Image (spheres, coloured by chain):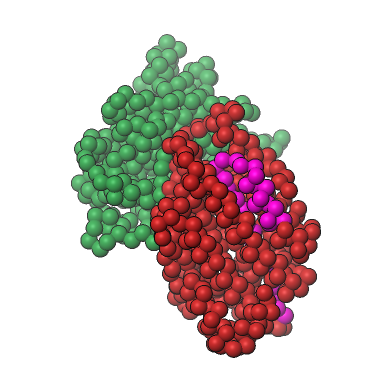
Chain colours: A red, B green
Amino acid sequence: FQKNKVMCLQSKYMLNSLVNKFMALPVTDLDDLIKNPNDTATKMELMIMETQSKVCKAIESLEAEGQKFEVDKWNKESGTGGGVTCVLQDGKVFEKAGVNVSVVHGSLTEGAEKQMRARGRDFKRFDDGSLPFIAMGVSSVIHPTNPHVPTIHFNFRYFEVTGADKKKTWWFGGGTDLTPMYLDQNDVKHFHTELKKACDKHDVQYYPKFKKWCDEYFTIPIRGERRGVGGIFFDDIEGPDEESALAFVTSCAEAIIPCYVPIVVKNKNKSFTSEQKQWQQLRRGRYVEFNLIYDRGTKFGFQTPGARIESILMSLPLTARWQYMHTPKLGSAENELLDVLKSPREWV
Amino acid sequence: FQKNKVMCLQSKYMLNSLVNKFMALPVTDLDDLIKNPNDTATKMELMIMETQSKVCKAIESLEAEGQKFEVDKWNKESGTGGGVTCVLQDGKVFEKAGVNVSVVHGSLTEGAEKQMRARGRDFKRFDDGSLPFIAMGVSSVIHPTNPHVPTIHFNFRYFEVTGADKKKTWWFGGGTDLTPMYLDQNDVKHFHTELKKACDKHDVQYYPKFKKWCDEYFTIPIRGERRGVGGIFFDDIEGPDEESALAFVTSCAEAIIPCYVPIVVKNKNKSFTSEQKQWQQLRRGRYVEFNLIYDRGTKFGFQTPGARIESILMSLPLTARWQYMHTPKLGSAENELLDVLKSPREWV
C-alpha cells in the first residue's frame, strides 16, 4: 500500500487519478502533497481520504433507494487546515452515517503542550514561542435504521510536532467499536475476528491490549455500562517506526468494510417491532451520553476555538430517547445485551 | 408563609396534615423536623416538598386523560439523605415532566471545600476532619408534547455548612427559565412579568440582575445560542438574612404555576405539523447538549459517588434529534426563534 502511494506521487497524473476516487480533493494542496511524497503526513492524509471514500461508497451501495452522501469541503477561517465532512441522513438502511476527515496545522497551545508532556513527550519551542503541529484523522459513526443492525464507530488519527531542534515527535491513535442494540454473538465474533486479523499482522500483542483498552475507554461510568461490545482502541502508537505504525493503522482502516458490511447485509432486512425500535432509541440516548460527556475527541473539539461543530456532532444519532427508569425484563433480549454491556466478554 | 409553617410545626397533628398533601413523606423524619421548627433547613425542606406537590398537581390537572406522576421515594445507601422523584411520562399534553426533591447530608470533600473557598467562603473542619453540610433542592423540567407549548425548568436549592467553630454558612440558589420552540412574544412577556413581580417584592435590583445572569448561564457556547428565552438565575444568595432569603426563594417558587400554566392552557390544543414536531425534536437535542455538557448541577451529579442517575437525567426529554447542518429558512418562524436565542432581548 505505502509503496503504491509513493509511486503514485511520483507523477502528478498518478496522484490525480488517485484523488479522483476521493469524495473531494484532499485538504492539503496537491502541489504540496507531491513535493513531500515520503512524509508520513502525506501518506496518512491520502490514506484517510481513501478510507473515507471507500466507506462512503460501501454505505451507499447498501442503501436501497440510491441515497447519497452530502459532501462538505470546509476550511478553517484562519487558513490552518480544514476537512471533508460526508453525511448521509434519513436513508432507508442508514438513519445517519457520517465520515469526517480533518487536517489541521497550528502551533500547540501551552495547555496542549502540558498535557502531552504529562504523557512523557518533550518539545522545544521556537524563539518566537511557536511549536508547530499537524493533526489529522478520519472519524465516522454509522447509525442504521433497523435495530437489528449495530452502530459502528471508527477513528484513525495522526499527530506530529516539530520542535526548534528539528526533532519530529509523532504518534498515531485510533480504533473501531461496535454498538449493537440486540446481541448476535456470531456478529460480534465476526467483528472482533476481523479486527484481530488486522492487528495480528503487525503484533500479536496488539489485539488483546487494544481490546481491553477499548472496553475501558467506552465506559459510561454514570450507567455502569460500556457503550457497546467494544473492538479495539489505541493511542500513543509511536513505534516501532513511522512506516510500520502507519502500516498497522492502515490495516485497521482496511478492516472496517470486511468487519461491518457483512453484519449490515445479514440484518438490514429483518423485521422489527415498535418496541424494538424504542429500545434502539434508548440505547442511542446512551450513545449521546457517552459522546457528549466522556468522549475525549468530542470534548477536545468543544474546547477548540473555531472548531466546526457540525462535523464534531455528526457522530450523534438522528433520533434518541430518554425514558425514566426503563428496566428491561429479566431473560429478555434487551437484558441479554445489558449483561454484556455491564461485563465485557472475550469474543475471539 | 413562614409563620404558618412554624405554627404547623408546633403540633405533630398539624405537620401531618401539611405533609399529607405532599407527593410523599419528606426525606427527613417528621420527628426530626418537628424538633427544629425554626431551622431554615426545616422550612426549606417543607417548602420544596410543597412546591413539588403543587407543580405535580397542576401538571396532572392539565393532562387530558388522567395521566399521573409516578412517585419514587429513595434513600442514599449510606443513609445520608435521599429524595422524592416524580415523573409523568408519555402523557397526552406532557411528553415528560419530572419534579425532583433531594435532601443530602454529608461531610464536604476537600475538593468541594476548595471550590467554596474560591468563592470567598471560610470553614473550620472538626478535629476528626469532617465538615458537615446539608444540601437540598427541588428541580424540575417539563417537556410538553405540542411544539407550541414551551419547556420550563426550575430549581431552588439551599446549602448549609457547619464548622467546628459552630459558625453556620448558608446560601440559596435557583431560577426558572423558559424554552419555547416557537416564539410567542406575549407568552414570553407574561413569563418574565410574573418572575419580575416575584423578585420586585424583595428587591427591585433582583430581576434585572438575575435575568442577565440567566441569559449568561443558559448559553451553549458551541452553538452560539442560549437554550431558550431565559428567565431568572441566581446563586450565592446569602442575605440580607436567612428568613428574607428564604422568603425570596419561596416567592420565586410560588411564581412557577402563574408564570407557566396560562401558557400551557393557551397553546396545548393548537394544531401542529410534522415539520414543527421535528423542529421541536431538534431544539430538544440542544437541550440535551446544554444539560450534559454545561449544566453545573448535572455535572456535579455525575461526579457525586452514589448519586441517583435516573433522578439527575430525569431532566432530559423523552425524544430528541440531531440533524446535520439543519438551517431554518430566513424569515421562517424557526429562524425568528433562533434570532432571539442568539441575541437575548429585554421582555419587561
Query: For residue B42: magenta?
Result: no
Residue A183 falls inside the magenta stretch: yes
Above or below for A119 versus B96: below
Residue at 42% across, 18% down: B19
In the rendered image, which quarter is residue B127 located in? top right
Where residue B159 sits: x, y (%)? 51, 37
- Residue B36 image position (x, y, % from top left): 50, 22
Residue closest to the eye, A68 or B196? A68
Instruction: Indicate the quadrant containing the N terminus of chain B: top left, top right, bottom left or bottom right.
Output: top left
Q: Is residue A250 visible?
A: yes
Where does the image place residue B158, in percent across and percent down from the top left? Answer: 47, 36
x 51%, y 73%: residue:
A22
Instruction: Please indicate whether residue B258 sits to the left or right of residue A14 in the image.
Output: left
In this rendering, the count of numbered labels is 0
Q: Is residue A186 left or right of residue B191?
A: right
Residue A162 visible somewhere in the drawing: no
Of the pair B72 and A259, the residue shown nearer to us: A259
Looking at the picture, tell me which residue is in the foreground, B110 or A114.
Answer: A114
Q: Hey, which residue is sitting farthest top in the picture?
A: B13
Q: Which residues are magenta?
A: A167-196
The x, y position of residue B240, in whole percent, is 40, 40
Give the side of residue B222 with respect to residue B256, left or right: right
Rendering quarter of residue A73: bottom left
In this image, B281 relative to B102: left or right?
left
Residue at image coords 67%, 47%: A189
Q: Which residue does the image show at 62% across and 56% down from the upper left?
A: A259
The residue closer to the viewer here, B5 or B286, is: B286
The answer to whether residue A215 is above or below residue A165 is: above
